[in-house]
Image (tube, rainbow, N blue to C red):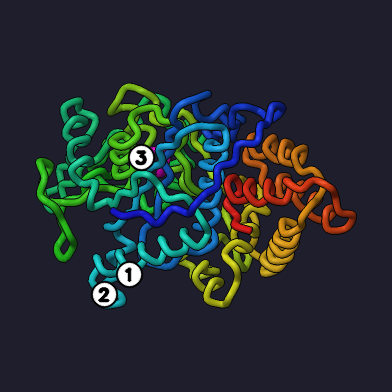
Amino acid sequence: MKAWSAPVVPQFELESPLAPQRLRVHDTSRAQLVEAGPAEGTARMYVCGITPYDATHLGHANTYVTFDLLNRVWRDLGLQVNYAQNVTDVDDPLLERAQATGQDWTELAEDQTQLFRTDMEALRVLPPDNYIGAVESIPEVVALLESMKQTGTIYQLDDPEHPDWYFTCSEAPGFGQVGGLPESDMITRFAEMGGDPERPGKRHPLDCLVWRMAREGEPAWESSLGLGRPGWHIECTAIALDHLGAHFDVQGGGSDLAFPHHEMCAAEGTVATGEPFAAAYVHSGMVALDGEKMSKSKGNLELVSRLRNQGHDPMAIRLALLGHHYRSDWEWDPEDLARAEVRLGQWREAVELTSALDVRPVIEKARMALRTDLDAPTALGLLDGWAQASLTIGGDDTESPALVRDFVDAVLGVAL
């Protein structure tokens, strides 16, 4: 599957001797900051993608801008990045929306995936190296399940009507560490998030579906497991292992994915390879509107495409998102965008100066903030101070305006 076009990112090579030379981020599974990525070479990251049945809202954008920032900070540290992302282009919500609207499910998926691509391009999110649809990944899913079948870690229900295949999550080493929930809470949340803890015939309530046998009127594919389609979690596990290998550096997504999705992926990957699935599990916070988390099912959404169509600069939208620490939960307010537009205008005015205050110490501190749990709000505040002071009192450094333009473009992803 084609991703989206990569923005032209300037090379930024200003030395930063005092800033940390490794990125540290919060690992949900250990509840502490950890070093993420190697000291040199290639960092590997998997970020869970969209189910394409509706437009990209600001909660989605917050997640993908967060991991774009992580990607850029790694690159600023001199690392190569291998980034994989899925598209769940066959799943119950997509099929239900297609049926409700009378659309072909494949056309709906492609239309919404294309809108997502357009939004990501506008926000200058670097595209993943591997952008893989669930349908495209079926051979890898089946191969993974065949290997797990040999070890007895998946089983088929004794159900004459729907003999689906399940994975024995509860027996996986370390199961429960990603979300950090007691079993009773896991069972409750599993049900809330589309799981089926009460299904008869399962060995344990938390065992998760990995191959859904064909139902009338649903798409299905032939396989050694029978005619059917992948479950949600195994799709990401197979894609990540196929394109990144075992024990990659970061699995990322919104905090609502910590359990059950990332918990199940971690269990599947660990059982399949005998190694930890990911070294760190990094989660962005939730964005609310009207007092509740933005949700397609609830309809309380502010859409990136709508804001763009209203004439708002995508760079201001990006700055509005970066103005909140990536791990915080917050509520969208139009004033966020208004403040970001003022900030963007001031930065653009400052980088047009022929000379300004020396920005090198500011960039040093901004790098320190970004390399310490992606503290974008602090980095933005430092650049505000430089811009305001340069516009007010001037300065005699002729290189600083261009340095700011390139640093903000390369590391923060904002084109000035």
Residue drawn at x 61%, y 49% is 412
Q: Which mark is residue 103?
A: 2
Q: Is residue 388 above or below residue 137?
A: below
Residue at mark 3: 206
Left or right, residue 319 beside residue 229 = right
**N-terminal-most mark, 3 or 2:** 2
**N-terminal-most mark, 1 or 2:** 1
Q: Which residues are magenta?
A: 260-264
Image coords of residue 362 (percent x, y): 76, 41
Q: Secondary structure at mark 3?
A: loop
**N-terminal-most mark, 3 or 1:** 1
- For the C terminus, the quadrant is bottom right
Residue at mark 1: 97
Left or right, residue 224 beside residue 372 = left
Can you tell which quarter of the image residue 248 is in? top left
Q: Secondary structure at mark 2?
A: loop
Pointer 3 local density, CA inside 10 Å: few below 14, some 14–19, many at least 20: many
Q: Is residue 67 above or below residue 288?
A: above
Image coords of residue 130 (percent x, y): 34, 45
Three-letter residue code for mark 1: Arg
What distance separates the C-alpha of mark 1 from that of mark 2? 8 Å
Labelled pair 1, 2 in contact (Cβ < 8 Å): yes
Three-letter residue code for mark 2: Gln
Three-letter residue code for mark 3: Leu
Out of 136 and 142, give the one closest to the viewer.
Answer: 136
Q: Secondary structure at mark 1?
A: helix
